[in-house]
Image: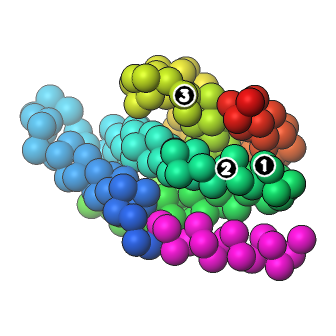
Amino acid sequence: MIKLFYLFFCRESKGYLINTNKSWFSLAFFLLCILIFPLTLDRSYVSLDKISISSIWICALFANLISLESLFKEDFENGSLLQYHVSNIPFSIIVTTKVFCHWIFTGIPIILLAPLFLIFLSGSYEDVVALFFSLLLGTPLFSLLGMPFSAMTLCASARAPTLIFLTIPFYLPVIIFGVLSVNSFKNDSFSEYYLLSAILCIGIIFLPYITIKILKESLK
């Protein structure tokens, strides 16, 4: 099982490094969105430091959505998923490697870049640690929550719009608690972090199982 996981992990990682639509495009989208905020706001009415946390979370959400469409699409269209199913390869390994690689190549770059952009937008180092830990809990939730919907919309004709409209309502609580966690960190309150951690633990247990069921149904 470990060897099989390693083989799938290497294959998926190679796909992210080669295919620009999987990781590089979403990261570029995140960077462009962050750079647009200072250009579109009038500093005389709105201070960037007041909306910097929210803007980073919103940009992280849409950057994640862009990469979700290709999570299972290529393997479904070229018949790899059907071949895995016929060959009795455990879908648990396939789903685990895909969500893990998705977070590594889309979530982790955002986690590392977000504190730098927070300093760029607000000019302060005050919330850097709080933002880092909130995104550390929030970005894997983005990947986990989007995974079942990516599998569910494999056969949809208008796949991208359907995926966006289905996924965003489930992303909203993560964004709300993520932004609140950064703001409450100053008051030594960690309740939102505990809540995000609890949601993440539940998601790790149940969401891959739900995704496996959806993928098997889509192959029938």
Image side of residue 1 versus residue 216, left or right = right
Residue sitting at 56 percent across and 71 percent down?
Answer: 13
Relative to residue 126, is residue 188 drawn left or right? Answer: right
Task: Give yes or no for residue 55 being in the magenta stretch.
Answer: no
Distance from the alpha carbon under mark 3 to that under mark 1:
17 Å
User: Which one is in front, 143 or 68?
Assistant: 68
Look at label 2 and name its amino acid: Leu
- Residue 81 is tagged as 2
- Which residue type does callout 3 highlight? Cys
Tell me, for residue 155, which label it has, or none.
3
**Residue 154, image x, y percentages:** 55, 33
Q: How many marks overall? A: 3
Quarter of the picture containing the C terminus is top right
**On the image, which quarter does residue 181 sit in?**
top right
Name the residue type under label 1: His
Q: In the rendered view, does 143 fall on the left or right side of 52?
A: right
Span colored in magenta: 1-16
